[in-house]
Image (cartoon, coloured by chain):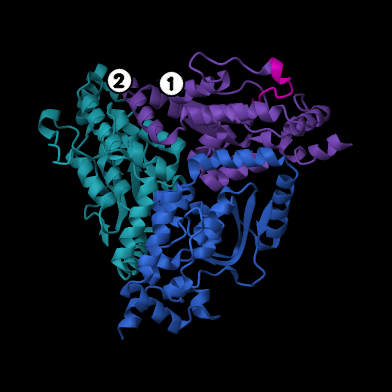
Chain colours: A purple, B blue, C cyan
Amino acid sequence: MVVFESAVPDFFLAHYDIGAPPSRSAPPSRPAGMPSWLDVLARIANGPFVSIAKIRGRARGAGSEFALACDMRFASREHAVLSQPEIGLGLVAGGAPTHYLPFLTGRGRALEIMLTGQDYDADLAERYGYVNRAVPDAGLDGFVADIAGRIASFDKAALVEVKNFVGEVSLPAHDLQTATSRAFWVSAARPASRQRLTAAREQGLGRPGDFEMRMGQHLPGLDQATDS
Amino acid sequence: MVVFESAVPDFFLAHYDIGAPPSRSAPPSRPAGMPSWLDVLARIANGPFVSIAKIRGRARGAGSEFALACDMRFASREHAVLSQPEIGLGLVAGGAPTHYLPFLTGRGRALEIMLTGQDYDADLAERYGYVNRAVPDAGLDGFVADIAGRIASFDKAALVEVKNFVGEVSLPAHDLQTATSRAFWVSAARPASRQRLTAAREQGLGRPGDFEMRMGQHLPGLDQATDS
Amino acid sequence: MVVFESAVPDFFLAHYDIGAPPSRSAPPSRPAGMPSWLDVLARIANGPFVSIAKIRGRARGAGSEFALACDMRFASREHAVLSQPEIGLGLVAGGAPTHYLPFLTGRGRALEIMLTGQDYDADLAERYGYVNRAVPDAGLDGFVADIAGRIASFDKAALVEVKNFVGEVSLPAHDLQTATSRAFWVSAARPASRQRLTAAREQGLGRPGDFEMRMGQHLPGLDQATDS
C-alpha cells in the first residue's frame, strides 16, 4: 500500500521537462521494450501493490499520467488541478493518457480533456471521473489515511488478485501505450511544437510564476506569440 | 474544428424519417460496405478534425446518434433533450448507439436509455455522461466558442493523433456497427413496428406538435392505439 | 420484464454464505463449464428479458453481484447500501464484479470499491455509476413501476436485440468470469481468510445485528481479532 503525495506547495507533479531538446531528454528503452516513462507507469498500474494518488496542487502532463497509473485518485477540493496540457504545446501526450482516461471518464470527456488542454479543478474532475472523489482539503489527509489503513490491513494476495482482474478489462495493451510515446517524440520534433515550446519558455514554462500556476489559460496564445 | 448547431428552434436534429417505407428510405451501401448513415457517423467519429455538438432542442434517434459520433457534446441546460426513442416504435436503433453509448455512460445507463426510450434533459444527460456538460443556455454559445477557439489554435496533426489514439480504445468495430443497421431494417419490417409507426404517425410523428415535443411521454401507449 | 426486490427489511440480498466450509458450499459446475453462481449471473445478464434491481437495504457480495448482472439498478436514497466486502475477509470476489464494475464505474472507482470493501450509500453509488440512479424511497416503487411498465409495453424482439448489442461491448468474456470463481475458492482456503472468517463469525457475520448492518465498519479489524 503506497500513497503518493507532494511536499511542494501548489504542485503534485508539475510535468515532464518538455523544454529540453529530445536528444538529451529522450530516455533509453527498457529491456522489455517499453520506453522508460511508460515502464514507470506500467510498474505502478500493474505492480503487486495498491497505490493512491493524494493530489494537492497541479498534476499536469506526466504528473496527470502518474496519477492515472495509480489505482485510485483523491483530490483536494480547493487545491487540486489536473490537466493534459501537451496539445497546447503541439505535443501528443506520451504517457498514454489517451488510453488510460477513456476507462475513467468515458470517450467524450477524455477527448475534451486532451483536445482542450484545459485545467480541471477537483469538483469537475470528480464529475468527469478523472479522480475518484474531491475531498475538502482539511479532511483529505484523514480521508486517505483511513482508506490506506483499511487496505493495508487486508490480505495482500487477495488485493493483488483483485487488482489484476480489474486490469484485465481496464488497462490498455502495452503496444498501444508504446505508440503514444513514439508519437510524443515525433511531435516534439515538429516546427509546430518547437515554436510553441520556445514561446512557452519565454512566458514562464518550467519556472515559478503565473504560466505554471494557470497554464490552461496561457496555452491558446502560444502559436501567435511565436509568429511575432 | 467544426461545431454543429441547429437553426431550428426546439430541435437539434429531430430523427430519421422512420415513417417512410423501407423500400424508399433504405439507403444504398457505400463502396466500403458501410450503410450510408453509418458511413456519415464513421466519417465524423474517425475524421481528421475535431467536432463539437452544441445541443439546443431535441436530439432524438439519428439526431442523438449524430451527437454521439461527435467528439464532444455540450447541451443547453434549459433547452436540450436527448433520447433514443426507437424502441418505442418497435425498432432497433440503427446508428449503433448500442455501441457508442456504453463508452460514455457505462453499461447500465446505456441499457436504460435505449430500453426505455425516455427523454433525457441536459442535467440528467450530464450525470449519465450522455453529454460532456450541461451549460446554462445564456452562456452556451460563449462556452463552446471558447473551447472551439482554443482547439482551433492548436496544431492539427497533434489533435488528429490524439483523437485517433482515443478512438483505438473507445470506438466500436465497424462490423459491430453494421450489424445494428441490419437489425434496424429487419425490425422496421416487423408487424410490431408497422403498427406502432402507424399509430405514431396518426398521433403526430414527423409533424410539429406535442408528439414531437414530448415524444418520450407518448411512446408507451402506441401498441394499445394500434390494437383499436 | 422482471423487477427484483426484497421482502426482507434492511437487506436486498445479504451475501453468499461464506461461512460454510468450501467442501460443503462449493457448487458443482454447470454442463457448459460455468460454475453455478456465474451461470445464474450470466443467465440474467444475457437472458432474453429485461431486468431491474430495485434496491432497498444491503446488497453486499453476491447480493451486489446479482444487482450488477441486472440490466439496470435503481436504489433507495435512504435505505440502499452496496458493497463488495469480500476483500475484508481475505477473499477474492467470485462473481466477477472485477469484470462487471469497470463497465459501470470506470477503472479507478471499481478498484476503490473492491479494494476497500466499504459500504456505499445510494447517493455515492449514483455518483460512481454503481447504480443508475438514487431515488427517494417514497417514490422508488412508482419510479420503477413506470419504467418497468413502459418497457413491458414495447416489442420484446427489439428489446432483446438492443440488450444483446449492448452486451457485445460491455460484458466480460466467460473465461474471465470463470477465473474469478476459481480465485474465490483458492482464496477461501487460505489461512488469511479462514482467520478473518472465524473472527467475523464471532463478531456476527451471518446473524442479525450490527456486524451485518454496518459490515464496512467492521472489516478492517478482523485480522487483529484473529491474532488474539
> Is A22 part of what is drawn in magenta?
yes
Residue C224's label in the rendered image is 2
Residue marked by disc 1: A47
* Cα distance in 3D space between marks 2 and 1: 26 Å
Picture layout, residue B214 above or below residue B71: below
Between label 2 and label 1, give the one nearer the viewer.
1
Label 2, residues with CA under 10 Å away: few <14, some 14-19, many ≥20? few
Visible residue check, residue A200: yes
> Is C46 part of what is drawn in magenta?
no
Image location of residue B123, percent across then percent down: 54, 58
Residue at x-position 36% and y-position 58%: C162
- Which part of the image, by quadrant, shows the C terminus of chain A? top right
Task: Judge from the rendering whether residue C142 lies leftward or rightward of residue B143; answer left or right.
Answer: left
Residue nearest the viewer, comparing A99 with C111: A99
Residue at x-position 48% and y-position 53%: B128
Q: Looking at the image, which residue sits at the far front?
A: B31
Q: Amino acid at mark 2?
A: Gln
Chain label for disc 2: C
Q: Tell me where the magenta segment starts and ends, as one range.
A: A12-24
Image location of residue B133, percent across then percent down: 59, 53
Image location of residue A63, percent across then percent down: 61, 27
Residue at x-position 47% and y-position 74%: B24
Is most of the magenta stretch helix, strand or loop? loop
